Image: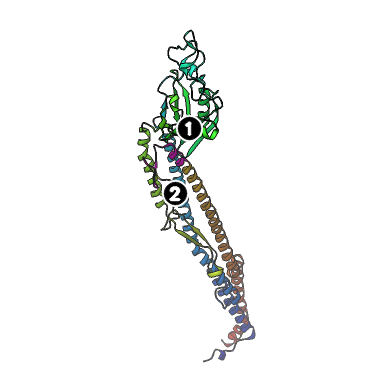
């Protein structure tokens, strides 16, 4: 039997339709309250539904990239911490070199004259000390033994380098790659002037002891060549100073070979020898620390390349950052092993020049480490900025999608109350509409 076989009054049918509409609205309201969304399918609003889906998809993709960005940050930070520790090790190496440099007395080539310079046979010092008498001795003129003696006291001491008054006195000093020459002295100059010239060289120091002997000491540990000679011209004086036969070293009690073969240090520093293992252990730690500065399989101090993706696109549209690492070793920083010889891989810790070179290399290493640290810091700042941006843009995308699909829960709650009231009123109205039919029923009883 069809439902339409039952005859309803117009009022009853109208109230029934109103209740059905209310029930449909109530179902929609309850669905929104349970899901929190006003758009649950494309049937609700195709434009809003698919727009929100696209926004949510991109937000999800960017969120998945956050793990890669976070790993990139940790990789850069691991390398940065490694550089900090290596910098500390390099500073310890500097302390080791400084300690080695401070103990150099036994590594200085030294020559002391073998006899008094200016006391003639039969003479005496008189009122002057041997030191002062030697310092005041003239370089040229007749030798001291022929100087005038008054009362047994030397009054006019001459070293006798050259009897020609117009001759030039030349001094030549060489140590390692450094050479100093002087042609400013004459026969009228004194031993004091020689001492002053040598001290100006920056290669050696000179002094006259209380015993009247001249002592020359190298500034560094390199073989020291020193020659003093005279000549009719500056160039001739320099040539004679450099030669092994025509120089005046013997006038000072020095050997002729001091100008050619040179003077070498007579011993090694025990302190420096003991510092070799300490220095080399530190350089080994630099290499090992650099190898341990990786994170999740990426080590920027071992030459690895780190690529961090910032968006979901590829090709020309891709947004990413490439961080190229460096192979960090002691050797690459210019730090070689310490030893007792100078080679391509070792420096002579007993040699002052080698120590000075290593000191400069360590300073350069610190500059390189600072530059590398700065580059990593710049990359880290960039990645952290992009991380914050990705978080914010993900939030914007999600919020935009929610604005298109989320229901206003306050409004839906109010609607629920209104629909509940409307349903109650509809039921009451339907009951009133059926009152007339109930009157007919009374007549039939």
The residues colored magenta run 339-359
Question: Residue at left 53%, top 32%?
Answer: 182
- Relative to residue 36, is residue 325 drawn left or right? left
- Relative to residue 222, is residue 389 drawn left or right? right
Lower position in the chain sequence, tag 2 or tag 1? 2
Check residue 241 in the rendering and tell me which mark sits there, or answer none.
1
Q: Is residue 288 visible?
A: yes
Q: Classify 10 Å Cα crowding around label 2: few (below 14), some (14-19), many (20 and above).
A: many
Question: Residue at left 48%, top 7%?
Answer: 151
For the residue pair 131 and 144, the one nearer the viewer reads as: 144
* Distance (Cα) linking label 2 and label 1: 55 Å
Check residue 82 in the rendering and tell me which mark sits there, or answer none.
2
In the rendered view, would you say 52 is above or below 271? below
**Badge 2 vs badge 1, beta-carbon distance below 8 Å:** no
SS for callout 1: helix
Whether 346 is among the magenta residues is yes
């Amino acid at each position: 039997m069809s439902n339409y076989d039952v005859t309803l009054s117009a009022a009853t049918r109208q109230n029934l339709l109103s209740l059905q509409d209310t029930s449909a609205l109530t179902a929609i309201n309850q669905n929104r309250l349970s899901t929190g969304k006003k758009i649950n399918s494309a049937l609700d609003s195709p434009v809003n539904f698919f727009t929100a889906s696209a926004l949510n998809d991109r937000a999800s993709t960017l969120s998945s990239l956050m793990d890669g960005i976070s790993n990139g940050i940790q990789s850069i930070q691991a390398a940065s911490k490694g550089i900090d520790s290596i910098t500390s090790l390099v500073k310890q190496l500097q302390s080791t070199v400084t300690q080695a440099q401070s103990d150099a007395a036994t590594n200085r080539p030294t020559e002391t004259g073998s006899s008094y310079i200016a006391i003639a046979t039969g003479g005496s010092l008189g009122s002057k000390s041997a030191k002062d008498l030697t310092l005041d001795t003239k370089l040229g003129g007749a030798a001291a033994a022929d100087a005038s003696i008054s009362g047994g006291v030397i009054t006019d001491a001459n070293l006798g380098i050259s009897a020609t008054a117009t001759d030039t006195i030349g001094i030549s000093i060489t140590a390692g790659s450094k050479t100093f020459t002087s042609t400013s002295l004459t026969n009228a100059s004194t031993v004091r002037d020689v001492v002053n010239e040598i001290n100006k060289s920056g290669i050696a120091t000179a002094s006259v002891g209380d015993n009247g002997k001249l002592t020359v000491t190298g500034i560094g540990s390199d073989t020291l060549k020193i020659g003093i000679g005279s000549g009719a011209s500056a160039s001739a004086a320099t040539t004679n100073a450099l030669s092994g036969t025509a120089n005046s070293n013997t006038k000072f009690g020095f050997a002729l070979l001091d100008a050619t073969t040179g003077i070498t240090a007579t011993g090694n520093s025990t302190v420096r020898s003991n510092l070799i293992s300490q220095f080399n252990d530190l350089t080994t730690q630099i290499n090992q620390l650099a190898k341990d500065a990786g994170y999740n399989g990426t080590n920027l101090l071992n030459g690895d390349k780190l690529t961090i993706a910032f968006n979901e696109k590829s090709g020309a549209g891709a947004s990413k950052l490439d961080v190229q690492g460096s192979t960090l070793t002691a050797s690459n920083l210019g730090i070689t092993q310490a030893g007792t010889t100078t080679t391509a891989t070792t420096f002579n810790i007993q040699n002052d020049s080698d120590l000075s070179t290593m000191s400069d290399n360590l300073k350069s290493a610190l500059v390189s480490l600072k530059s590398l640290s700065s580059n990593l810091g710049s990359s880290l700042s960039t990645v952290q900025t992009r991380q914050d941006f990705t978080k914010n843009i993900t939030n914007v995308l999600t919020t935009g999608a929610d604005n298109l699909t989320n229901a206003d829960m306050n409004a839906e709650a109010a609607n629920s109350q209104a629909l509940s009231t409307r349903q109650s009123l509809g039921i009451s109205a339907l009951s009133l509409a059926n009152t007339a039919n109930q009157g007919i029923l009374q007549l039939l009883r």
